[in-house]
Amino acid sequence: MTKGKTTGRRKRNALNVFLFLSTALTGSFATNALAQDDESVGVGDIVITATKREENLQDVPISVQALDAELLDELNITDFADYAQHLPTLSFTPSYGPGYNRPFMRGVASGENGNHSSSQPSVGTYLDEQPITTIVGNLDMHLYDVARVEVLAGPQGTLYGASSQAGTVRIITNRPDPEEFSAAWDLEFNAIANGGFGQVGEGYVNIPLGNRAAIRMVGWAEHAGGYIDNRAGTRDYTYVSDSNSDIAKNDYNDSDSYGGRIALGIDLNDSWTITPQIMGQHQRSNGVFGEQSDVGDLGVTHFFPEWNDDDWIRARSRSKARSAISISCSQPRS
């Protein structure tokens, strides 16, 4: 991870401070109609795989909460902070910017830090069947074309191993579908009152490759507007004065991210499938996500450039028959 100097405490829940205005454009294409049936879909119809097999959410004998694709879309959930607010068993500590949230459950907090000199995280995070738990903070993965988010409260060491003493978060992506071609795109433009402007572009395409294979490609790019002002100031030393005029600006804690995912699904026969997948994201956030009490509301006076680069890439291959076998590899987060 490449960082600049970071100070202050991030005011994470920006919706409590600002009026968020957004306009969204959406398009989709499919060989068959994409509309749901007229009958409403209830919570009892959500199928989860938290116990390593497909089960109805209402039939699982453990504490599980889930947000399916319909809810994720209705609530405009795009990242960890969004879905954590809608899952009562999941909490997180205030962060210093994107990628620094630390989740916890049932009051069991971990004492990990970025120097790897303390305890491991107490909540495990999984992308499909692959662990993506990190000690410096969660991967702030952009959510798009996701089937559901599952949260298992309580110790999950039997099913999910280390760093799941308090619970586990699972992000389940949509798999390639050999049955039909489909594609969709979304554009969003937004503004923060007394802050900056932002925009999001995202889309996916699912292409069948014969009767037993398909490839699914997903991509996104996002610019998040800032809301912290780096106000002009000077520092006086003996015989010299220092100014921050070259970096002073309004809304200077903006961020940019882009990434993608590609998966190949192959049905070897009626009961055996294999799904290799690779996914990665680059994210750069500028400035700090907190304020100085002596400067004023949502303001700081800093004299050095501040930034954070968060890059990661993950690859995995999942084979599924009567039991699931997952082979994974990853590049260290940088």
Image: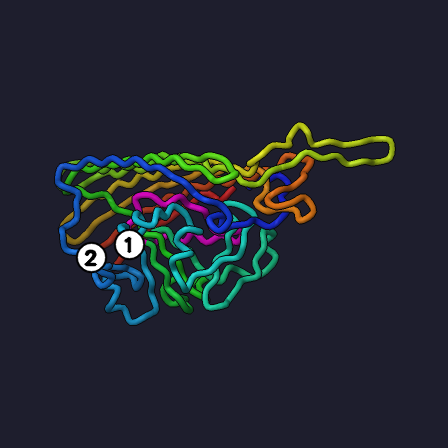
Residue extending furthest bottom? Answer: 61
Compared to residue 1, the image places residue 127 above or below, namely below
Magenta region: which residues? 129-148
Say which residue label 2 marks. Answer: 41
Q: Nearer the viewer, residue 17 or 75?
A: 17
> Alpha-carbon neighbours of circle 1 within 10 Å: few (<14), some, or many (≥20)?
some
Q: Please, what secondary structure does the residue beneath circle 2 have?
A: loop
Q: Number of numbered discs present?
A: 2
Residue that appears at 17% across and 43% down: 34
- Kindly report the distance in space between the C-alpha atoms of the residues bearing marks 1 and 2: 10 Å
Which mark is nearer the camera, 1 or 2? 2
| Tag 1 and tag 2, C-beta contact below 8 Å | yes
Residue that appears at 52% across and 54% down: 135
Asked if residue 12 lies left or right of residue 34, the reply is right
Q: Is residue 132 visible?
A: yes
Residue that appears at 28% across and 50% down: 69
Q: Does the magenta-highlighted stretch encompass residue 132?
A: yes
Residue flagged by tag 1: what amino acid is it? Asp
Q: Is residue 219 visible?
A: no
Where does the N terminus fall, quadrant-wise?
top right
| Main secondary structure of the magenta stretch | loop
Say which residue label 1 marks. Answer: 68
Residue flagged by tag 2: what amino acid is it? Val
